[in-house]
Amino acid sequence: MKGPTFRTGLRRPWFGHRRRGRVPVVLQAANNDCAAACLAMVLGAFGAAASLQECRSLCRVRRGGSTARDIVTAARQLGLRTRAFACAPAAAADLAIPMIAVVRPHHFVVIERFTRRAVYVVDPTVGRRQPTPQRFAADSLGIFLTFAPGKVAGRTRTRVPPPWWPYVRSSLTAARGYLIAILVATAVLQLVALAVPRSMAVVVDDLVRGSEVGVVSLLGFGMLGVAAAHLGSGWLRATLLSVVQRRVDGHLCRGLVHHLFALPLEFFTQRTSADLVDRAAGTAMIRELVIGHGMRALLEAAFLAIYFVVLAINDLMTASFTAVLTLVHLALFFAAGPRTRTLAHEHLLSQSKAQSALSEGLNGIHTVKATGVEQYVVAHWSILFDTALDAVQRRMRYAGVFEAAQSSLYLCGTLLLLWLGAWRVVSGTSTVGEMLGLNMLATMVLAPLTSLVMTAQRLQAALAHLARIADVLDVRPEPCPATPVRRHRISGRVELRGVGFRYHPEDPLVLADVSLTIAPGQKVAIVGPSGSGKSTLGKLLLGLYPASYGEVLFDEVPLAALDAANLRRQFGVVAQDASLFSASIRYNIALGDPDLSMEAVVEAARIAVVHDDVTALPMGYDTFLVSGASGLSGGQCQRLAIARAVARRPAVLLLDEATSHLDVHTERRVAQNLNGLTCTRIVIAHRLSTVIDADKVFVLDHGRLVEQGSPTELLSRGGPFASLVAQNDITDQP
């Protein structure tokens, strides 16, 4: 059957302009960033500017991405007039461009041109591509967004340093003294190299004129001195470079990781841990390119200019010919740059997806083995891995073509210079020595030029790493009040006043108008059906998510005015997904307090009823746990998490389904031990045995506090709490 054809004649777009400037390529930094990247590209086409982070915020990017409605809302906030169309792909050719199209599977791309042979698409995943009309029609979901300039004209492009520049600059500043020494050593190397062409010209011409052997011998000793100076300065430069690389690498990686752990929890819900680890590992390549190649390129550019000036002073014709070759080299570089960046980004993104799939499969190996789906998990990883290999192959093939072209240019330039010099010698306008000296000097311009262009090409690839790191650095750390209230010890009084929470402004409320008060030392239970907002309430108490409205207070002080880190250190928390780290059991219990005594560690283990289990192990508290503690039972892991929570004697103990893997007898022993603590206890649980002795129970339903009181009082009322018990949503059974 014949596929769709696109009319490409003149059209009358709804705002009177058919198209704007060329769409700049903005590649997405994460899997859910396609909407934000497309909006940034459309803005760029109208001559305006907005960062990917700004567009991400306005598009309300969540874990599942954004919707077309989010793009429309964000575009209007940025000053664009926009309309949405639902039509056949062939009819979209009559709409204004650039436009954003929705393609399978729920992905956004920018269309910048239609022709009868291809649709010119800018994909935030891979950059520019040209699918056929038939292929585009098969992929399209028939939803298109068109744009027109409104107040966006006021958003002019401004020179704003990229978010990674202060990060790299501070790393270079930390090694400033060594960098200056490296520059000096490199300068000596280049200055020594200048002596070679002049020496060759003198030697050759003296030989032709039949000079004495003594002169040649003297020149020979001079050359040995030049070689020794070259060797010494080269050794010094290499030694200093290794020191600088180590320092800068440490500074880069530490700075990134420090910033990463200061980011809000929401950031980590939108990215996989494997992807973030891959980004942190990219600092090594950035260090290698910026320090190893970048400094060399900087000096080569400076000395290339010096060599060229010296060449022009000695012979203008050779200098002019060399200048033409230089322009050809640079033209090739600028033509290849955008494609190089796109291929590098595509490679990194596909590699990250494959690594994430492998990491998830290994982390869930128990489930994979238990369900017998090894072959399906491997097949899924293989598809992603093959995609990554294809991306590597495309990148290497393109880089190989570029390097071959540069090498060929260098070879042809050298041969042409030799031919030009020979012609001038034959014509009597130059001596053999002058010809060789000028050729060597011209080669000293072309050789670093080739090296400079190749280094610049590698730096283009490094920009893909920097873009992924910028995605992390561009996110603001958790907000901290200018003058936070620091309390050495809170009493444990907790109060919520009309608190509501939603993940994004247009999402439904997860919690609505919740008001409650917990006195110091009380044990309170938060219960309710699944999805009622219990765990979310726990995250609000910790300040992991800010309340959309209302106030959370500790000792009458608003949470927003407190130092969040200091507050959390006074909490003992056992979450549903509590993690144990690849370290000893003692380290896991004393986490965050390396000075915690062994007696305190053992006491915490006794409270959690896990001491006997630990001492039964051959190495006791020095037993090393692998990631995920796969050698322990679920109940043992939970009890170790409880021991960690109580080890530092917290002011508030928050237990979110902390005993769900324990039998009733063990759970009762743990509860009795916890009753001996003087801290405030907030228990989120389904078992009646866990909450029956609570001083107060708060019942949540659909995010609202529907009931509160003592367990006995609530059971006697026959309300929601009693219904939960009757429906076995809260049960005595393990």
Image (tube, rainbow, N blue to C red):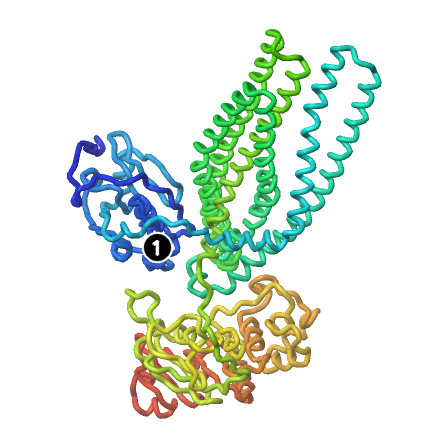
Please indicate, yes or no, whether residue 611 appears anywhere in the rendered image: yes
The image quarter in which residue 196 lies: top right
Secondary structure under tag 1 reads helix
Measured as percent of width and height from the top left, residue 423 is found at 58, 10
- As shown in the figure, which amino acid type bears the numbered disc 1? Cys
Write down the residue under mark 1. 55
Q: Nearer the viewer, residue 734 or 647?
A: 647
Q: Residue furthest top?
A: 427
Measured as percent of width and height from the top left, residue 583 is found at 63, 65
Measured as percent of width and height from the top left, residue 97 is found at 24, 41
**Residue drawn where x is 28% and y is 65% of the image:** 506
**Residue drawn where x is 25% and y is 55% of the image:** 76
Q: Nearer the viewer, residue 264 or 608?
A: 264
The image quarter in which residue 256 lies: bottom right
Near mark 1 (Cα within 10 A), the count class, few <14, some 14-19 or many ≥20, is: many
Measured as percent of width and height from the top left, residue 115 is found at 25, 32
Q: Nearer the viewer, residue 475 or 345?
A: 475
Q: How many labels sit on residues?
A: 1
Apparent side of residue 556 relative to residue 169 in the rendered image (left or right): left
Q: Residue furthest right?
A: 214
Q: Residue furthest front?
A: 313
Q: Quadrant of the N terminus?
A: top left
The relative height of residue 702 versus residue 414 in the rendered view (above or below) is below
**Residue drawn where x is 70% and y is 69% of the image:** 618
Please indicate, yes or no, whether residue 107 appears anywhere in the rendered image: no
